[in-house]
Amino acid sequence: MVKELIFNEHTAPLTYYGWFMDGLLVVDVITNTKLVASIDEFVAQDSNIQWADVTEFMRFSSSTYGGTIIGAPLNAKPLSLNYRRDAFDAANLTAPNTWEDMVLAAQILNSSDFNVDGTGDYSMCWELKDCDWVGKVAVSAILATMTAGYQTGFLWDPKTMQDFGGSAAMTRTMELIQELLPYSATSCFYLNPPFAEGRCAMTIALEMLFTGVSLFTPLKSVIGTAMVPGSTRALNRQTGRLELCMPVLCPHAVLERTYAGSEVLVNRAPHFSTGAWSGFVDARQTNVHQQAMYAFWSFMSEPAYSKQLAMSTIALGPYRKSHLDTSAQSLAAWGAAGYDQVATRDYLTIVGRSLEHPNFAMDLRTLGGSRYLDTFTTALRNASGGMAPAQISANVAAEYTTILASSGPRDVAIIISSSSSKTPIILGVTVPLVVVLSALLVTVLVMRVRRRSLFGGHWVPSPGEDTTLVVTVFKGLRVRAGMHSGVQKVDMERNATSGRVVFGGMPLAVTKAIGDAGAGGMTLMTEESFQRLHPDRALKGVLVLAMGEHGLKDDDLGSVCMYQAMERLAAFEPLRGLRGMETGVMDAPIGTVTIAFANMDGLATLQAWNREQADVAFDAYAAVSKQLLHDSGGSLVELTSLGLCLAAFSHPLDAVAWGAGLIEVMKHHEWGELCEEVLLHESAAEGGLALLHRRVLFRGPRLKVGIDIGKVQADVSPVSGRMTYRGRVMNRAARISGKASSGM
């Protein structure tokens, strides 16, 4: 969403009248665009929205910013513990109040046959192994109960800005996750099918699970709702140790009974996985359009209608005080909609406690907050892989340090290197960026350095394919750079007055167009520059990513394959003012992927017969393959001179459409001497006449396509900058392609 809004502000700023967005993204959009309008006046004049009826959390989370109302509240996403009351009653257990109790309940209930099919089931359906969004939620939800919650910051100490990534609380969080891992069934869906099918006893989920179970399953009368468990210990920020909760350390903790039978202070921090969702209005639209957009959001948020939506759809849950009414009249309305009234009363009570809790925890409201939460996904994977909790905690702390180091102002070192030198030579000194910025430099650096001392002179580079143009542009406190290699003598001219060499022509035009496509902090290069990178000179901590083929603003410049050099945790922003012609690595699928192998059969034989004709045929095959990949949403993995096109897709139907389309389009290409046709003759009767129809089966080079789907391990190749995949599906797809006949 953020990338889309940033892109449209620069390319088509009046595309949207408004948008629906969660609170996690608010700061990024406000910081990077001028699209968010204040709706203070609209709300003040609107009696239908009933602002006082909106819970405090909703008003605070994403509907206001800097004391100004910017969004109409539409949905909250509180987490809750959902459990089978019948299963817990049979085991003489209550809903767990602490994480330790939850581990104990999981141990006791595991292997029970909850759905009476003769097979033992997992006790939990909280997927902690292979589900990224659950990973972020799980770590945040547990950690927040030990770092005291919102009032004092659950990821940072607001007084010292010390993060808790490497704290004792994070280590204990990882310990608890590893204790829970053996008891959880696999489910990476918001609606949690194992729970809905009765195959487990408890899970931690969003509000939509209760709605889905109540409306579509027979479990609606036995589903129970409780607050997310809490912790009996909290982090002492002075000593760095976890200590038993006392009123000073845990001011919001309350006495609760644990499975051990004792009453202790339990600190809870109800977690909201994506904060709250609100409807926003575009500040660049006319006042008439802004009023119309606000009127729509107001209608969606109006108490009676929004309550109707909360009862009838899994997409929206209760977030207003009137939604949480548990009077007999209100519960009767829920009952009429298909809900069990007792279960609904408990559900609404728990949601209300979470929304009004003084110690709630929500996702970060800071620029690039998602980058910090992404570290939790890695942490969870490490936990499931058996890494020691203390090491996982240390890794999170190191990643936080890296993210912080990549934020804010930086110093700039001017480095000029040459392909003829074995090592880069630093010709400039490090200077504060503000000094460079104040000079408003737009610098073109095209230099090749000979082997000289640090303070030796440098020479003007001669024309050649290795000579690289770099255009750096300063934007705010960040630099964007465009690079292109290949300068001819005609592109160089010595200025008679200054004695300096001036570069121009097509190479400089392409270089500037590349630089203009980037946002601040981006380094972009063409394929010509990428191919001249030396693997042994790779910069530590820097990735070079294939961003796909793009048409430049000036049609005369044609299209280029774009690459971006970026730090591993750098923020990514969309390219500007370009026509996408090939999907880049950032859009490549991961997880469960459909792999397609397409082979140009007999290319080696054709190359031996007529190399020129073979090159023409391959170029046509490559162009058609990439164009169809872009049209079908596929990602190019590899395209070899031997005729192999390896592609990845998110959905198998897209892969099938690409493969079938490739074979069909290639039939109609102009192949010249290669235009050998194989026709199928069919007879048909029309109007009493016997007619002969001809259908082209093959024309031009033969193709074979093999497709399979499965889980993969994905990595960015340092050689190609593209996503590479490993897994059994790769071998299966290759074998399928090998077994196929020509034209299949």
Image (spheres, helix red, strand yellow):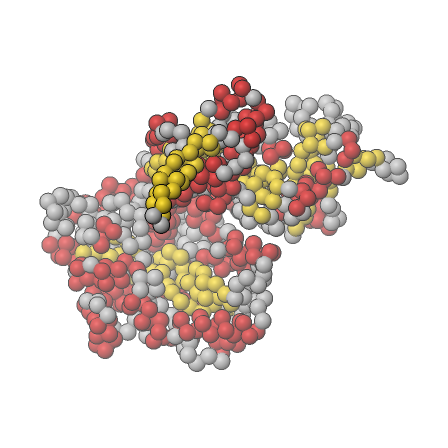
Whole-percent x, y for residue 686 in the image: 36, 48
Q: Is 565 on the left or on the right of 191, as rendered?
A: right
Q: Is 66 on the left or on the right of 428, as rendered?
A: left
Whether residue 568 is situated above or below residue 326 in the rendered picture: above
**602 vs 558, nearest the viewer:** 602
Q: Is residue 342 visible?
A: yes
Whether residue 279 is situated above or below residue 653 in the rendered picture: below
Whole-percent x, y for residue 117 in the image: 12, 47
Q: Is residue 537 visible?
A: no
Outermost residue on the right side: it is: 497
Whole-percent x, y for residue 306 in the image: 35, 71
Q: Is 164 on the left or on the right of 543, as rendered?
A: left
Outermost residue on the top side: it is: 608
Q: Residue at x 26, y 60 (%)?
A: 212
Q: Is 212 on the left or on the right of 519, as rendered?
A: left
**204 vs 556, nearest the viewer:** 556
**212 vs 584, nearest the viewer:** 584
Q: Residue at x 49, y 21 (%)?
A: 604
Quadrant in which residue 315 is drawn:
bottom left
Whole-percent x, y for residue 611 in the image: 57, 22
